[in-house]
């Protein structure tokens, strides 16, 4: 049992590649590789008895992942089919194999929130259009260097590559109705900020929360402003939605999408809020000393790390999410110079 400053990891082992590990009665942990710095994702199998199995999140669309799923099916399903595929949100490591999964298991129902279903379809088809003009202008206004912008602009989006052809229909999940799964009613908790309508699932009977990316034990989920909505305030939405998790029992077993299952839900929710408050304070102080571009705030948020093209994309969105939150609070203002770059000044 590992302990880390308010977080308790009750399991000393992790599932082997191609296999699963039971973490609570009837709930199995599957761990799949990712081709990113964040090199894994946790996926979940829920035993629904004679009806079959539910899969919660699917992994990214690679041949390695589908091969590993076939090993998991052979080792875990006991000859019973997957009858339900549940996806927490549209990101490729979660939505990536949803389409493949429902085609692999004919008759399996696909569950997602309306926001995530529509966002997945929007991004999947937008990528096909190849229109990146808005993205280029966004990074120019953020104050990135020409070399950084060239690296981002020359990088094609991996969404269509990382997500198989989407299911043709879905069953909507919403906070208005629980999801009946494995004989229990699972409360649908909607979180915004990291995604448009991220689903976490809580079983009161089991005291288990499948948290997706909304609550992670060691890192903060990426909260970002994207080129399609440059004036958005996703951080306000994220912070407004987090207190709902404090209403769950403190001894809830949290099953996150990254790292490992843990106890310490309330501690972690409060720590995430404090983390973002610290970042906001640092940016507010800096904007009081001199006008700051989005790019200027990177050392405050990310230290002196060297950021590759993919990391620059996430860093820009994350920095602007904090800056826009301060703008919406009315404590800093945005100015646009003759060079077309945004600069932010404390009021």
Image (spheres, rainbow, N blue to C red):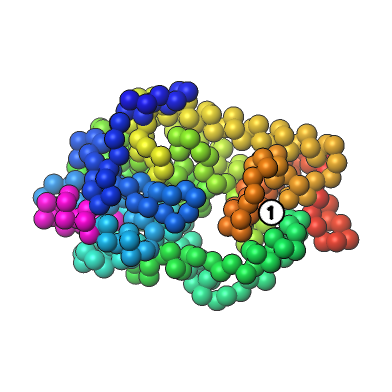
Instruction: Name the residue that disc number 1 marks.
Output: 231
Task: Please provide the residue range marked out in magenta.
Answer: 70-85
Residue 88: say if magenta.
no
**In which image quadrant can residue 171 be found?**
bottom left
The residue drawn where x is 47% and y is 48% is 38
Name the spot of residue 137 as percent of width and height, x first.
Answer: 72, 65
Residue extending furthest bottom? Answer: 129
Quadrant for the N terminus in the image: top left
Residue 75: say if magenta.
yes
**In which image quadrant can residue 8 be found?**
top left
Q: Is residue 22 visible?
A: yes
Residue extending furthest right? Answer: 338
Q: Is residue 183 above or below residue 129?
A: above
Left/right placement of residue 26 relative to residue 198 reads: left
Q: Viewer-proximal residue, 220 or 252?
A: 220
The residue drawn where x is 39% and y is 48% is 41
Name the spot of residue 215 as percent of width and height, x first.
Answer: 45, 38
Q: Viewer-proximal residue, 290 or 241?
A: 290
Q: Residues within 10 Å of mark 1 (few under 14, many from 20)?
A: some
The residue drawn where x is 65% and y is 64% is 151
């Amino acid at each position: 049992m590992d302990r880390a400053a308010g977080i308790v990891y009750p399991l000393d082992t992790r599932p082997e590649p191609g296999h699963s590990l039971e973490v609570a009665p009837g709930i199995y942990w599957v761990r799949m590789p990712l081709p990113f710095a964040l090199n894994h994702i946790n996926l979940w199998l829920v035993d629904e008895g004679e009806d079959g199995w539910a899969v919660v999140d699917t992994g990214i669309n690679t041949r390695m992942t589908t091969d590993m799923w076939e090993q998991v099916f052979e080792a875990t399903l006991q000859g019973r089919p997957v009858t339900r595929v549940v996806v927490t949100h549209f990101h490729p490591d979660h939505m990536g194999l949803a389409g493949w999964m429902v085609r692999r298991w004919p008759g399996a129902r696909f569950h997602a929130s309306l926001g995530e279903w529509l966002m997945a379809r929007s991004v999947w088809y937008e990528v096909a259009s190849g229109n990146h003009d808005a993205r280029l202008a966004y990074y120019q206004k953020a104050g990135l260097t020409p070399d950084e912008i060239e690296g981002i602009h020359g990088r094609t989006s991996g969404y269509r590559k990382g997500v198989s052809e989407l299911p043709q229909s879905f069953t909507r999940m919403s906070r208005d109705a629980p999801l009946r799964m494995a004989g229990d009613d699972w409360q649908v908790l909607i979180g915004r900020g990291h995604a448009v309508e991220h689903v976490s699932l809580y079983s009161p009977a089991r005291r288990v929360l499948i948290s997706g990316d909304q609550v992670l034990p060691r890192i903060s989920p990426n909260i970002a402003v994207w080129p399609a909505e440059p004036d958005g305030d996703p951080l306000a939405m994220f912070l407004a939605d987090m207190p709902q998790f404090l209403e769950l029992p403190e001894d809830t077993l949290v099953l996150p999408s990254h790292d490992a299952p843990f106890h310490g839900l309330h501690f972690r929710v409060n720590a995430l809020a404090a983390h973002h408050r610290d970042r906001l304070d640092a940016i507010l102080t800096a904007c009081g000393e001199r006008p700051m571009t989005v790019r200027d705030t990177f050392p405050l948020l990310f230290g002196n790390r060297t950021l590759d093209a993919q990391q620059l994309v996430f860093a820009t969105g994350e920095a602007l999410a904090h800056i826009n939150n301060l703008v919406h609070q009315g404590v800093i203002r945005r100015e646009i110079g003759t060079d077309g770059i945004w600069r932010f000044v404390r009021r």
